[in-house]
Structure formats: C-alpha cells, structure tokens
Amino acid sequence: MSDYQAVINEYNEQASSYTDYTSLPCGVLETQLMTNALGNCEGLKVLDLGGGSGLRARQVIELGASSVDVVDLSPEMMRVGKDIEESLGRNKIKWVEADLSQSIQHLQLGEYDLVMANWLFDHATSEKVLEKMWENVVTHIKPGGRFVGVRSGDPRSLVFSTGKYGISYKDLEDIPGGIKLRYVMHVEPPIEFEGTPMEIMYSGSTKMHEKFGLEDVRTERYEDTEIIKNGDPDYWKMFLDNPGMAVNNLGILYQRMGLEWARDNIAAFGGDPNRMVLWGQSSGAALTDAQNLAFPDDPIVQGLIQQSGSVLVPVGEELVTEDPTHSNFTLVARGAGVPHTRAPSSLNA
C-alpha cells in the first residue's frame, strides 16, 4: 500500500468537486498566472506531474499544446478528467497512475518540451521525498525545455487563516523541515486534504531548483494578471502583502543544453557550428544576455542579438536593477571608449 493512501482516498472521495477550484478568487488568479508563465504552447509535448483531473493539462491544450501526459496517484481524479475530455470530444491527454514520491523511470515516458508540477511539492513529507519529486521533474525535461509550477507561500500567512480568497489552512503542525496541515477549499460543499509543504519550497528559496540544475528562477508577477490589475486594490492587499502562492518559470540551464545540441547537430542541417548567433526579443533578450554572463568563457555562439532587453533591463523593481537614467548604458559605453557624458549623449554617440 502506498504511503500516500490516506491522501489518495481523500482525493478519490472529493474528486468531482475539485474542478470548482478555478471559480474561486485564488483559482482565477492561479489560472491567469499560469497563462502568463506558459505563454504560447503551440505544438508542445507536455508532462503534468500530479495533474489530477487535468485542470492545467486542459489549459496548456487550449494554449496550443499537441499532447499532455498526466501522472497522478488518484484514479478517481483522473477519471473525472477523462470524462471532461470525452465530453469535449478530445483525445490529447493521456492518464498515468503513479506515486511521484518514488522514481517513475519505469514508466519510460521520455522527454518533454514542458514539465509542470502544480502544488505537487506540497505533498512531500520530507526533503528526501521532495528531492525524489524534483528528480522526476528534471529527468523528463528535454534539452531546451522548461519547467513551470505552482507552489505554496507561507502557510502561516493571513491569506490562509481567513479563507478570503477561497482557500484556508487549519490544524498546522510543525514537522521536520516543514509543516503538516489541512487544506480547506471553500467550494460548495467545502473539501479538504492533507498537505506537508516543506520550508525550503514555501520560503521562496531556490536551493532545490539549483541543486537539480534549474536556473533563472522567475516568479510571475501578480500585478501582471487581469484580476489584480483590474480588481479592487483593497481586496487584494492582504494577498499581495504576503502571497499565498507563487508560479515559477525556470529554464536557463536547459536553454544552454539546447545550444549545445544545436552546436553538435547543426552541421547535419547544413549549418556552421562556428558561426552560430543567439537572438532574443524582450524577455528573450534578457535570457540571451544571461547565457553570455553565465558562460563567458564558452558562450558557444559567435554573436548575440538582444532586441529590446538585457539582464539589466529596467522593467520592474523585482528584477536585477532599475535604470531610469540609462546609467548602465553609460557604464558600458565608457568601457567601449566613449567619453564620459550624460546618458542621452551616450545613446547618440
């Protein structure tokens, strides 16, 4: 019997009500954060670990993904998802039952353009189990692929004590490395599950990501969602003061692996590995720059084209720096031999 049998039973018994989560304020916010993180999924092959009834699997299909493999330990949650897909007349989601606290290499799933794990890590009963879950993530990301996932914020946040946004936590108990608790989802009727979020995750630490080679950990900005931008600022203040969840979007190391693959194989397509150029626009330009900074002695490419962005781009207080006076450009210009001048003059030099 699985160590998670109690959790399996809870999800099985309440599976039909779980899909109502997306109608709650926090569910709407999560959907919009995920949309921003996922972007255009046209043609992508996706793995959804702990995907349950397929809430996010259906979302990536709607964003253009060609197929999704959902892996979950609750057969009843997946049955609900199968029924929904059948009602939609689609056959793009495959359902696989497995315990993600253990290795899933025996499933021989292969590699994916995108791997998701939404709330999965909140069921890791120890850091050792958490590491096994992360192994299942990274071993299935193809070179050049990426990971997107939802994690819990501080379980002791006021956000979770009031249930204001549709979810509350109760019966909190300290355990080694984290907190054991009961999630309450305020749908009709309310449903609840056991969770064990680890501090290394809910604290926002990137230690676990970096341990498994996932760099460029980017947290989606809540202010970029429609529900926050167009909503009541007073209503969302408590959440923004101490957010109850975060959506992370990772991938710089796998971009590097993609470059390595291109270098090793471009000749077969008539290209020259010694004349490769890396191009990116906006946030892609920042990632292009990040590759150069991360691997200065071996950038692989011979040229970089950064259109409308760099790692120092002044687009928000949460990023590396703000530069309203363009002084970063002045510093670079001075290093290139342009005399010290005011920023506008440097731009015209």
Image (cartoon, rainbow, N blue to C red):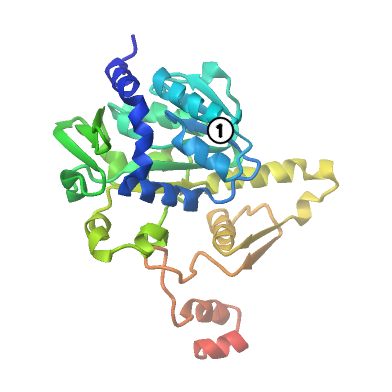
In the image shown, does 69 or 184 lie closer to the viewer?
A: 184
Which residue lies under the disc numbered 1? 88
Q: Examine the image and state in which quarter residue 226 appears.
A: bottom left
- The quarter of the picture where the N terminus appears is top left
Q: Secondary structure at mark 1?
A: helix
> Which residue is located at x 36 percent, y 27 percent?
16
Q: Say whether residue 339 is visible.
A: no
Q: Residue furthest top?
A: 1
Q: Say whether residue 347 is visible.
A: yes
Is 325 on the left or on the right of 333, as rendered? left
Is 88 on the left or on the right of 201, as rendered? right
Is 149 on the left or on the right of 12, as rendered? right
> Which residue is located at x 50 percent, y 90 percent?
342
From what the image shows, is residue 124 above or below residue 305?
above
Residue 237 placement (x, y as % from top left):
24, 61
> Which residue is located at x 73 percent, y 41 percent?
264
In the image shown, does 255 or 299 lie closer to the viewer?
A: 255
Residue 295 placement (x, y as % from top left):
57, 53
Residue 298 placement (x, y as % from top left):
63, 52
Residue 27 placement (x, y as % from top left):
35, 45
